[in-house]
Image (cartoon, rainbow, N blue to C red):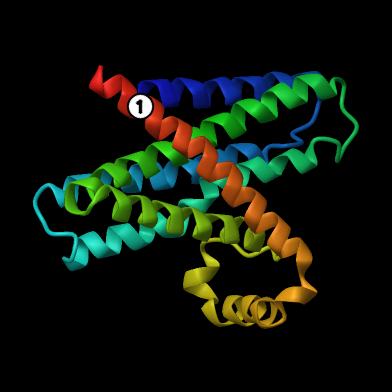
Amino acid sequence: MLALVLSSLTGIGLFLYGALRNHNLEFSYLIWNLFLAWIPFLLALRLVAVLRHKLWSSWEAIGWSLLWLLFLPNSFYLISDFIHLQDVQRVDVLYDAVMFTSFIFTGVLLGFSSLYLVHIQLRRRFSPRAAAAWIAATLVVCSIAVYIGRDLRWNSWDVLVNPGGLLFDLSDRLIHLTSYPQMLVTVISFFILLSSVYNLIWRGTRLLVTT
């Protein structure tokens, strides 16, 4: 927790220095996106606390699980913020790249940390293969959600406030899948990236735990 807080403050510090240097608040949305990345991590901690006393089939555990899954893609959505690097003319693009990387690294780490916490709980209740399948399915959902957020401009809140519009927009692409090749490229590439990196984190962490 302390390391994640310090990493978040590092990104914010880099942003503030860049804002002073460029005399503007461009890229301030990175702070908001980082805040959204913290939500699934905190929800995962809450879910773990609930699972200590209740079954996963309880309404409380199911509710926290759905909330966690709803906000988890925000952590990985930060990766797509790289496309904004050259939106505006700045003093030092390389510095901005470092700043972006700081925010994105912290956000992705928050997402994988929350995923790891949930993975541990799954392993305690299911076989390793079944738990891995649940994690893979979760990363597929996250990859689709990144596309929905970046290309269709929907967000997590819309699932609650405008589910009809979201389903209508997404269903058209699912029905006419071949007409949207960019969607397939985005979803598949994000899934490959997220699953490969998480696999490294999972295996590396388990190796440290067992030694």
Camera-nearest residue between 163 and 52: 52
Using residue 109 as the reference point, say whether residue 205 is left or right of it: left
Q: How many marks?
A: 1
Indicate the position of residue 82 as horizontal and vertical percent values: 73, 38
Residue identifier under label 1 = 205
What residue is drawn where x is 69% and y is 63%?
184
Point out the image quarter for the N terminus.
top left
Residue reaching furthest to the right: 89
Residue type, label 1? Thr
Indicate the position of residue 147 as horizontal and vertical percent values: 66, 59
- Mark 1 residue element: helix
What residue is drawn where x is 70% and y is 75%?
177
* Residue 150 in view: no
Using residue 32 as the reference point, say whether residue 72 is left or right of it: left
- Compared to residue 206, the image places residue 38 above or below, namely below
Indicate the position of residue 91 as horizontal and vertical percent values: 87, 21
What residue is drawn where x is 85% and y is 20%?
92
Disc 1 crowd, CA 10 A, few/some/many (<14, 14-19, 20+) = few
What residue is drawn where x is 31% and y is 47%?
118
Using residue 82 as the reference point, say whether residue 144 is left or right of it: left
